[in-house]
Image (spheres, grey):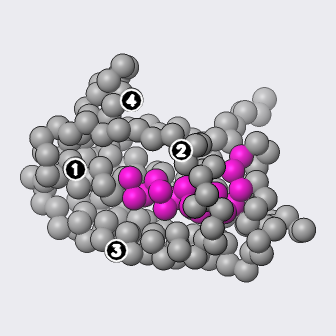
Amino acid sequence: MSEVIDTRYPIGRFSAPTTSGPEIRAVHMQTIRLLPERLQAAVKGLNDAQLDTPYREGGWTVRQLVHHVADSHAMSYTRFKLALTEDWPTIKPYNEAAWAELADSKLPIDDSIAMLEALHDRWVALLESMSEEDFKKFTFTHAAQLYGADPRAFAGTVVEDAVRRVLADADADATATATPTEV
């Protein structure tokens, strides 16, 4: 019997790791560092009609996905900074689907890719500057979690979750461009 895959989660739902340490984080930081380059390669040569094609039935277009990656990673970077500078900040979720319908999600993708290049340079520099003590005290409360499971997120888990999102974003773009729709 084949397993049914939920296409909303190209690499599966996040499962918190049981351990996290400098070696694991270094690998994850490298993934974050390389994402803009991987994303650029995935969409290279696509024309507007291909960028405006949903990458899966009922899903966003490739263009919306590229802009979503920029939005999502900007939010994640901001959340890291809040967690490093405030005591247990509560971070607000955002309506990703509504953001994908805003006018800026219809613009050319070059600005979002440039934004990701600059943002990831800063994000990796921030992560690399963090001491073990910073990672231990790095915490926040996600407002969406206040009504369910443990509302506190810890750095090790957050770094792994951020990397999984980076990989999912890159995988979704690779899937979208592996066999571009001919239009």
Residue 179 in sight from this viewpoint: yes
Is residue 94 found left or right of 149 in the rendered image? right
- How far apart are labels 2 and 4 at the CA level? 14 Å
User: Contact, CB < 8 Å: mark 2 with mark 4?
Assistant: no
* Numbered badge on residue 96: 2
Q: Provide residue 104's location: percent of width, then percent of height.
A: 58, 61
**Type of amino acid at the residue the image marks with label 3:** Asp
Q: Which quadrant of the view contains residue 103?
A: bottom right
Circle 2 SS class: helix
| Residue indicated by mark 4 | 144
Location of the N terminus by quadrant is top right
User: Contact, CB < 8 Å: mark 4 with mark 3?
Assistant: no
**Type of amino acid at the residue the image marks with label 1:** Leu
Q: Where is 101 relative to 70, above or below? A: above
| Residue indicated by mark 3 | 121
Highlighted magenta segment, given as a residue range: 59-75
Q: Nearest the camera: 127 or 183? A: 183
Residue positioned most to the right: 183
> Which residue lies at the image location 78% right of the left edge and 59% below the top edge?
53
Q: Nearest the camera: 99 or 148? A: 99
**Type of amino acid at the residue the image marks with label 2:** Glu
- How far apart are labels 2 and 1 at the CA level? 20 Å
- How far apart are labels 4 and 3 at the CA level? 28 Å
> Which residue lies at the image location 85% right of the left edge and 64% below the top edge?
181
Please report whichever mark, 2 or 4, sits nearer to the chain's N-terminal start.
2
| Residue indicated by mark 1 | 82
Please report whichever mark, 1 or 4, sits nearer to the chain's N-terminal start.
1
